[in-house]
Amino acid sequence: MLELAILGLLHESPMHGYELRKRLTGLLGAFRAFSYGSLYPTLRRMQADGLIAEDDGPDGTVRRRARRVYKMTPLGKQRFSELVADTGPQNYTDDGFGVHLAFFSRTPAEARMRILEGRRRQVEERREGLRDAVGRASGHLDRYTRQLHQLGLESSEREVRWLNELIAAEEHTANTSNTNEFPKKEGEPDHG
């Protein structure tokens, strides 16, 4: 997921490592812990793989200062497109979903829908597990542990509602664009 996040940020503009680190913290902070120790090795690997490169200075020479400025290469743009279109189960997890969601505006509509539906299934399963746990253990748990389980259950229920709203909005957008795909012929009544 770190590769997707880095490519997504560099898709916006070239950045030096420190700026990337700050932006990644803002992007990933709400969803997962971000290890600063993993950023620079990942940048080196991505550079070796040809996904990113050091940005040239104004005179065309690579900048040789304390801060290396990274930019996305054409191969990196291709890799970013592959990553945002990926709908595998790793994109439904707590870590993967947040990163993917941050780049939904650049994600194909079909992939967005599959990721949202996959995430909803995962959260619904978690919610049912929490309901079972609360129901089975309610008499055996102290009130604080019960409240902790209740908080998790309520959070899951809230996320399912939120996902349902996002899915409905995606469906509405798809239906709206499908009706606009076939422009009406001259003289046809307007049914929209």
Image (cartoon, grey):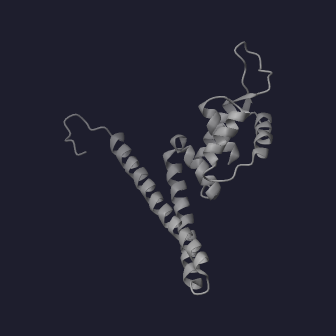
Image-quadrant location for residue 67: top right
99 or 20, nearer to the observer:
20
Where 9 falls versus 98 (above or below)?
above
What residue is rendered at 61% in x and 76% in y?
145
Say whether residue 105 is visible.
yes
Q: Is residue 177 left or right of residue 23?
A: left
Q: Is residue 91 left or right of residue 173?
A: right
What residue is rendered at 56% in x and 45% in y?
102
Q: How many marks?
A: 0
Image-quadrant location for residue 142: bottom right
What residue is rendered at 62% in x and 29% in y?
13
Say whether residue 72 is visible.
no
Spot occupied by residue 48 in the image (x, y as percentages of width and height): 80, 35
- Quarter the C terminus occupies: top left
Q: Is residue 120 left or right of residue 23?
A: left
191 or 36, nearer to the observer:
36
Spot occupied by residue 144 in the image (x, y as percentages of width and height): 59, 75
Spot occupied by residue 77 in the image (x, y as percentages of width and height): 64, 34
Return the residue found at the far top. Answer: 59
Spot occupied by residue 63 in the image (x, y as percentages of width and height): 77, 21
What residue is rendered at 66% in x and 53% in y?
32
